[in-house]
Image: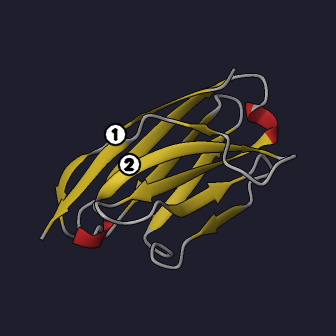
Amino acid sequence: QVQLVESGGGLVQAGESLRLSCAASGSIVSISVMGWHRQAPGKQRELVATANSGGATNYADSVKGRFTISRNNAKNTVDLQMNSLKPEDTAVYYCALRPIWGARWEYWGQGTQVTVSS
């Protein structure tokens, strides 16, 4: 069984930074892709960034150059450093895990709210 627990959300002003953390537990974590998604009010959930166990990362165009995902395989954690935050980054951010044998994000955290004021 996989569990994901996020922390680090909050309220910041535009231009400031915030760091989200996700702690994962479960036997398949080490062989899975970990990622961060977000969902703003009235919008579909979108993929923000991913990191596989080998260190490869990918980002949505909207966050490239501002967000950095980092994964610690020894601790089964994945962080999202968010710099130069914009009001449009306001959303609930979810940590998720996708087993390498599948195409779906199978496991989700409870979500953490990030609010960026202008």
For image coordinates 66% across by 25% down, the residue present is 2
Which mark identifies residue 18? none
Quadrant where the C terminus is found in the figure: bottom left
Task: First in sequence, mark 2 or 1: give its number.
Answer: 1
Between residue 69 and residue 87, name the one nearer to us. Answer: 87
Q: Is residue 116 above or below residue 87?
A: above
Q: Is residue 33 above or below residue 59?
A: above
Left or right of 72? Residue 21 is left
Amino acid of disc 1: Gly
Which mark identifies residue 19? 2
Q: Which residue lies under the disc numbered 1?
A: 8
Residue 26: quarter of image: top right
Q: Element at badge 1?
A: loop
For image coordinates 18% across by 55% down, the residue present is 12
For image coordinates 55% across by 62% down, the residue present is 47
Residue 94 percent across, percent down from the top left: 46, 46
Q: How many other residues sit within 10 Å of disc 2, few (<14), some (14-19) or many (≥20)? A: some
Amino acid of disc 2: Arg
**Residues marked 2 and 1 touching at CB (< 8 Å):** yes
Residue 29: quarter of image: top right
Left or right of 33? Residue 63 is left
Quadrant where the N terminus is found in the figure: top right
Residue 6 percent across, percent down from the top left: 44, 35
Residue that lies at the very extreme toward the front in this rendered image: 42
Residue 36 percent across, percent down from the top left: 53, 52
Between residue 1 and residue 63, name the one nearer to us. Answer: 1
Q: Element at badge 2?
A: strand
